Image (cartoon, rainbow, N blue to C red):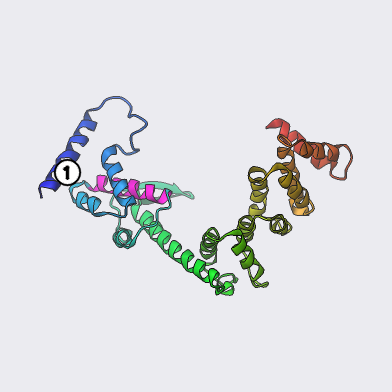
Amino acid sequence: MMKRLLLLLGLLFHLSAQAEQQGPNPPSQPLYQDVPLMILQRSVDTLMQNQPAWVIDLLPYLRPHDREVLLFESLRYLHQNNHIPDQTLKNWLLELASERPTVREAAVIDGYEVIRPSFDYPALARSLILNKVSAERSQLYLSELLRDEFQWSLIFRKNNPLLLAQQLDVMRAFRQLTPEQLDYVKLHMPDRLYFPDNNVRVAMAIGIGSDEALAEVLSLPMDQYSVSLLEWLIQRLPAERAYHLLRGAAENPELLYFSYSAIARLGRVYPPAAQFILAQFRESEHQELAAMVMIEMQSQ
């Protein structure tokens, strides 16, 4: 009881001190000044350690508005850092997920005025719970991949409503495999699978890291992940390797423009890439495209 009383007195002192401050708030302060930075920091620290007891003890002493601010800001920090709760924290999050915030505000969405929570901490609680589910699922997938028992067709099928979420967990499992293990997985992967995009195959190619694996995925029909891979080549590979792969990617008609653009950017640090674009501009069937990327480079 004495501990709770001291905690309440300390909180009231900080709130009173802030009410007396004049002028703009320092940028280091939290967005909502109703909850002192010290209290918010302590809340975040304890929750990141999966120990919600301190926050649970504090909440009954806060006004409803301050309570919702503290929960929202604390859970938002955990969400932004992809925190995976343990079972103790998950149990508390389940309670928060079922609550209905009392502080609400009006907003215009698609031309209609709606009333929504000002601090939607239950939504953040549900998201953090999904983090735990996702982590557990990726560990299951990892163990199945290592035992060569992974059921590809149960996930990668058109009528799977959880496909997008599950494929992210598969990719998380990929990151825990060595290049040799991932190459083995790719070799034994069934041929007829449904992939909604190139995300999984790009992740697999990056994990394997060989020129053959990277070139293979760059020959597929283009999507946003193919384009992102071109940038990855420039940023992460030695210039000579990246240039060779970009030249190969340009053989894919869908990636032609993006490959030329990437080669032009690589030319800033690798002269052969710049010379290639210049040669294409002087005499090639892609003369206009080369001119376009050269103009884009000059404007950047």
The answer to whether 264 is drawn above or below residue 84 in the figure is: above
Left or right of 118, for residue 177? right
Q: Residues within 10 Å of mark 1 (few under 14, many from 20)?
A: some
Q: Give the residue furthest to the top.
A: 23
Q: Residue at x 65, y 50 (%)?
A: 229
Residue picked out by circle 1: 7
Under circle 1, the secondary element is helix
Residue 4 percent coordinates (x, y): 14, 47
Query: Where on the picture, by quarter, is residue 8?
Result: top left
Where are the magenta residues, as a range? 64-80
Quadrant placement of the C terminus: top right
Please give the name of the residue rendered at 34% of the width and 56% of the height, measured from the top-left corner. 122
- Asked whether residue 119 appears in the rendered view, the answer is no
Does residue 43 belong to the magenta stretch? no
Depth check, front residue: 168 or 291: 168
Image coordinates for residue 46, horizontal then vertical, percent: 29, 49
- Judge left or right: residue 181 versus residue 15: right
Position in image of residue 73 (x %, y %): 34, 46
Question: Is 147 rendered above or below residue 268?
Answer: below
Observer-nearest of 238 and 46: 238
Asked if the stretch drawn in magenta spans residue 79, the answer is yes
Instruction: State the residue at coordinates (75%, 34%).
Output: 295
Residue at the far left: name it.
Answer: 2
Report the predominant secondary structure element of the magenta stretch: helix
